[in-house]
Structure formats: C-alpha cells, structure tokens
Image (tube, helix red, strand yellow):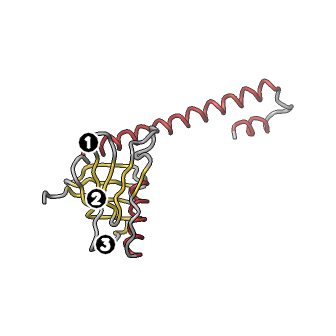
Amino acid sequence: MLLVTYLIGMDRAPSLRTLWAFTGAAALVATVFGCQRESASKAAATSARKELLTHCQADWRLVRWTEQGVDVALPKDARATLRCDSAGVVMGDSFVNHYSFMPPSGPTALFGEGTTTLMASSPDLMAAEDRFMRAIRHTAGVKLTDGRLVLSSKDDKGRLEFEKERAR
C-alpha cells in the first residue's frame, strides 16, 4: 500500500533501486510480523502443553462440554477420560474407544500423532466420540480452574471440562 501511494505521487517512474528498497522493506516487515505471530503461537502451545502435563498425570473424567458456547449433552451410558503418562503421552477413553496422542513434534502443536482403538457402538455414541476427538485436537489452551482441568479452543467457545476421578 505504501509503495502504491508513493508511486502515485511521483512525477516519473521509480528507479529499480527504489523498487528494490521498497520490496526489501516490505519483506522485512512481513518477516518480523510473521515471526512475532509464530513466536506467540509457539509460546502459547508450549505453555498449554506444560500446563496439561503438570496436571493430567491423574485420571480425569469429562463432566462438561461446550461447542460454540453451547452445552453439549454428555452420553449417559459412556464416559470420556483423560490422563498423561510421564513420557508426555495423552490418553483416555472417548465414549467407545481408547485414544492416545504422542508428544508433539513441532513447537506450536499441543498434541502429536493420535491413535484409537476401532470398536463400534450405537450411531449416537460414535457421533459423540467423533465430536469429542475433534474437540481435543482443536485444544489451544489448558488451565486448572476450580479443581477442573479445562481444555479450550482458540476462541474459548469450545471447552472440555474434566474432574479428577475418584478412587474406585
């Protein structure tokens, strides 16, 4: 935009040196702003991952779930859980199947590659499981609030709230 404004106000065509100077400055600005965004997302993911690993070495049970700020009804006959092991693997039950996520390979990811068992159930439970797994994969923030482990989406409209499981 600056280059266009500058060129419109000129009486003659700009020199090649002027064009290169503007191009270089624009590239530098884009790089700086891009690095700042990447640094912020790395820091956020690192912080969220640290928070998750600090608290999830216990067994947690899903007690509340919201999507787009609206509560999602939890299936009555199944449960979703979450826990971590000392190697940073996140695992649990997703209503029907068991899941696990390896530690992330990149600095901006909260979870790495995931796997699940392949058991089948009613269409309602399978749909709930698909939505739950999608919600976990889109986790951007993690915090402990009022004794609950809360995983939230980037816009905080999607939330998975877990309470510690009581010993059986």
Question: Along the polypeptide, which appears first: circle 1 or circle 3?
Answer: 1
Q: Which mark is residue 5?
A: none
Q: Residue lying farthest left?
A: 168
The amino acid on which the numbered mark 1 sits, given as a three-letter code, is: Thr
Image quadrant in which the N terminus is located? top right
Label 2: few (<14), some (14–19) or many (≥20) C-alpha neighbours in 10 Å: many
Query: Secondary structure under badge 3?
Result: loop
Image quadrant in which the C terminus is located? bottom left
Q: Which mark is residue 54?
A: 1
Q: CA distance from mark 2 to mark 3?
A: 13 Å
Disc 1, disc 2: CB below 8 Å?
no
Residue bearing mark 2:
81
In the rendered image, which quarter is residue 119 located in? bottom left
In the rendered image, which quarter is residue 31 located in? top right
Q: Residue lying farthest right?
A: 12
Residue sitting at 36 percent across and 56 percent down?
99
Query: Secondary structure under badge 1?
Result: helix
Residue bearing mark 3:
75
